[in-house]
Image (cartoon, rainbow, N blue to C red):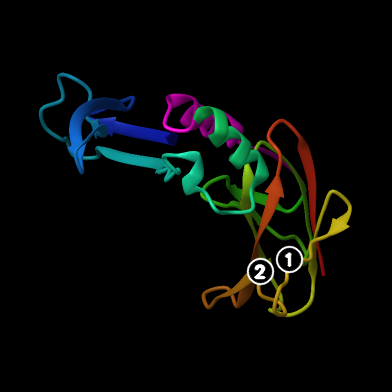
Amino acid sequence: MIRDWRARLGGREARPWVAERGTSARGTPSSTLDILPPPGVTRLEPGDFVEAVVEHLVLPQHAADYYGPDEPLRAALAGMADTWRLVHREATGNDRVVAVTVGRLERLYPDVRVAADGGRAAFTIRGGLGHVPITVTGLPAHRGGRFVVDDAPVDQHAHGDDFWQTDHDPATGTWSRTITAPLAAGTAHAVRFDP
C-alpha cells in the first residue's frame, strides 16, 4: 500500500504508477507489483525525487496458518483468507488519522510518532487494526513515565518491562518510548504519555 507519495519525475509532479506482473511462486500462480515512473517519462531530470511511504503486508495465506492472539484478524481470515478483501481490510482499517492535543505529530507510518511537549503527549488515533506501534519522542529520561490508552494504563509485560522499547537520540540528548497498542478500526482511541 502506498500510504504517502510526493514525486517529481521527468521535471513534473508525478503520481505513482503500478504495473502488475504474473508469476509462479513454488508452483502457485501469484503476482507482483512494480512501482514505475508514469508513461512518457524516459529520463530523470535534475531535481527529480520520490518521497514515499510504502507499507508491505505479509498476511497468512490460509486461516489455519495464523497462530497469533489477534482475534479480529483470526475472524477476518476465516472469511477472507487468500482474497483481495483481506488486503482491502488492512488498507482501509489502518488508514490512520491522528489529532494531537499535547505535543506534535511527526509521522503516521510505520509507527504513529508524536514529539512530547515537556515530557507529555496526548492525542487521539482513529484507524488501526491489531497492534499499532506508537512512539513518543523528546522524552527527558529513559525511565519513568507511562502510556495510557482509553484511560487505562498500558501493562503489556510478561517478564518485566518487556513490551516496550526505549531509544536514545544522541543529537538531542532525549529519549523515545515505543509500545504496540491493540486498536480497533473505526474507533477513536485516546492516548497519553504521562511523565
Q: Would you place residue 173 above or below residue 16 in this image?
A: below
Q: Residues within 10 Å of mark 1 (few under 14, many from 20)?
A: some
| Marked residue nearer the N-terminal end (2 or 1) | 1
Q: Is residue 93 magenta?
A: yes
Q: Which residue reaches farthest left?
A: 42
Residue hosting label 1:
156
- Image coordinates of residue 73 in percent, x first then y, are 60, 40
Q: Residue at x 43, y 27 (%)?
A: 83
Residue 178 makes an appearance in the image: yes
Q: Disc 2, disc 1: CB below 8 Å?
A: yes
SS class of the residue under badge 1?
Answer: loop
Which circle marks residue 111 in the picture? none
Determine the image quadrant of residue 194: bottom right
Q: Is residue 92 magenta?
A: yes
SS class of the residue under badge 2?
Answer: loop
Residue hosting label 2:
163
- Image coordinates of residue 38 in percent, x first then y, are 22, 23
Q: Residue at x 63, y 73 (%)?
A: 175
Q: Amino acid at mark 2?
A: Phe
Magenta residue span: 81-100
- Image coordinates of residue 163 in percent, x first then y, are 66, 69
Q: Amino acid at mark 1?
A: Gln
Determine the image quadrant of residue 29: top left
Q: Residues within 10 Å of mark 2 (few under 14, many from 20)?
A: some
Q: Which of the image's four quarters has the N terminus?
A: top left
Q: Which of the image's four quarters has the C terminus?
A: bottom right
C-alpha gap between disc 2 and disc 1: 6 Å
